[in-house]
Amino acid sequence: IFESIFNRLVGLLASCLVLASVLSWVKAVPISIDKTKVKLPEETVKEPPQSVDTGLHYDRYLREVIDFLEKDQHFREKLHNTDMEDIKLGKLAKELDFVSHHVRTKLDELKRQEVSRLRTLIKAKQDIEGGNDIAVDHQALLKQFEYLNHMNPHTFEVEDLDRLIKSATKDLENYDKERHEEFKRYEMTKEHERQEHLKTLDEEGRRKEEEHYEEMKKKHADHPKVNHPGSKDQLKEVWEEADGLDPEDFDPKTFFNLHDTNGDGFFDEQELEALFTKELEKIYDPTNEEDDMLEMEEERLRMREHVMNEVDSNKDRLVSLDEFLVATKKKEFLEPDSWETLEQNQAYTEEEMREFEEQLARQEEDLNLKAADLQKQREGLEQQQEQLNAQKIELQQAVEHMERIKTQKVPPPPEMHLQGNAVPESLGHDPPPVPPENQPLPPGHQDIPPEQQQQHVPQNQQDLGQEPQHIPQENQPLPPGHNSLPHDSPQMPLDHNNVP
């Protein structure tokens, strides 16, 4: 039985071997394939890593200039072979004369764009400050931007590259200091607001608030041990947890190549800061009330500065592979001291806090004075507005009154029809009484025959354009019916308008 089973197994094994050989022969037979119908897999082009923002206000201009300069083969070689001290002294800037015409043309365009951007910023600042009507001297204001030559806003020259390198180096050196000062002000402001809040509470409320504050501090301090930044223990932890490698196989050179993300042969500041993420996660959790994420970024900055000071021997703000390997052989790398976190090192002193509060008090007093002054100005403007409104109403009323006068129709004076030499009543003279017919005339007024009436025309008829009649002279005999009056008779005035 055993022999028969054995023979069957041998036969089955032989059959499997034959089948395997046949399959290998089938796969080995060349097959004619129409390559025009075969879609080849697309090759994925690996994009170069983007440069990290330096935090400078001209960061974009700086990165674009460096990117275009590195496209020139000659300049790229000089850049990688020049010492940082020589770069600071301006020796690298002189190599700009040897770059290609295409690169120079693009650099000219970048400079013109940057000058235009700065002028726009200056104009916007003037508008915000209320100086719209003031002429802006752009050339004078551009002097404050030392990283470019404002006297030549059109072309990128050696002086521009020299200015850019020196300004970026100086500004980056001051950048960390400014960040520390900002964080210190943040911490003091936070403490000041906490103290002001306590003043608004009663005794029981203050006690509870203080207890809660101390409890949060204890919870924040209760975290795993933080390794010394840049030490072997810290890097091996990254090697094991982030890279997934065996800590016993830790190799500094391999570690450097793994975390040189842009492959330029250097650890820059951002690549170094990325190495401390695991340590920071031990201390800070964004979901915890007691953990402040701004404090976490300050802790990251402290760790990076510490490693740079220990490893960056030429102070170019970069860690080369050689510098890194040298640092791994030092005692500080193998047996480091313990690392003190922020809660063990307060960001400010008591004296600085006192000065800060005094400064806040002065600022508050100034703001109150300005607020009172603005209130007075507001009241004055409101009074002026009321006066203007009253004047406007008076003006409108005057205009409406004039319009009514214009539209009102004044009746014309009545027509007067005068007969002969009659005087209108409006002249103020009462008309003499007209004697009725057949009434005897007064003495001396005899009837004048009709043929003689034409000779007695009133004198004022001359004004009507008629020729004057003959007037009898003195001592000339009167016509019949006109007797002379006695000398003792009263003189009666002759009314020429009362001729019957």
Image: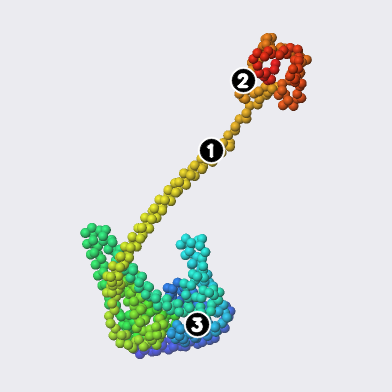
Q: Disc number at residue 401?
A: 1
Q: Which of marks 1 and 3 is in front?
A: 1
Residue 280 position in % (x across, y down)? 33, 75
- Residue 254 visible: no
Residue for point 30% across, 65% down: 357
Q: Nearer the viewer, mark 2 or mark 3?
A: 2
For numbered disc 1, what is the local secondary structure?
helix
Residue 266 position in % (x across, y down)? 42, 83
For numbered disc 2, what is the local secondary structure?
loop
Q: Residues within 10 Å of mark 2 (few under 14, many from 20)?
A: few
The type of residue carrying mark 1 is His
Give the number of marks: 3
The type of residue carrying mark 2 is Asp
Residue for point 75% across, 23% down: 468
Q: In this view, does 259 lie to the left or right of 27?
A: left
Residue for point 33% across, 74% down: 299
Determine the CA span between mark 2 and mark 1. Answer: 41 Å
Q: In this view, does 9 lie to the left or right of 157?
A: left
Q: Disc number at residue 93?
A: 3
The residue where tag 2 is placed is: 430
Depicted 63 relative to depicted 392: above or below:
below
Determine the CA span between mark 1 and mark 3. Answer: 81 Å
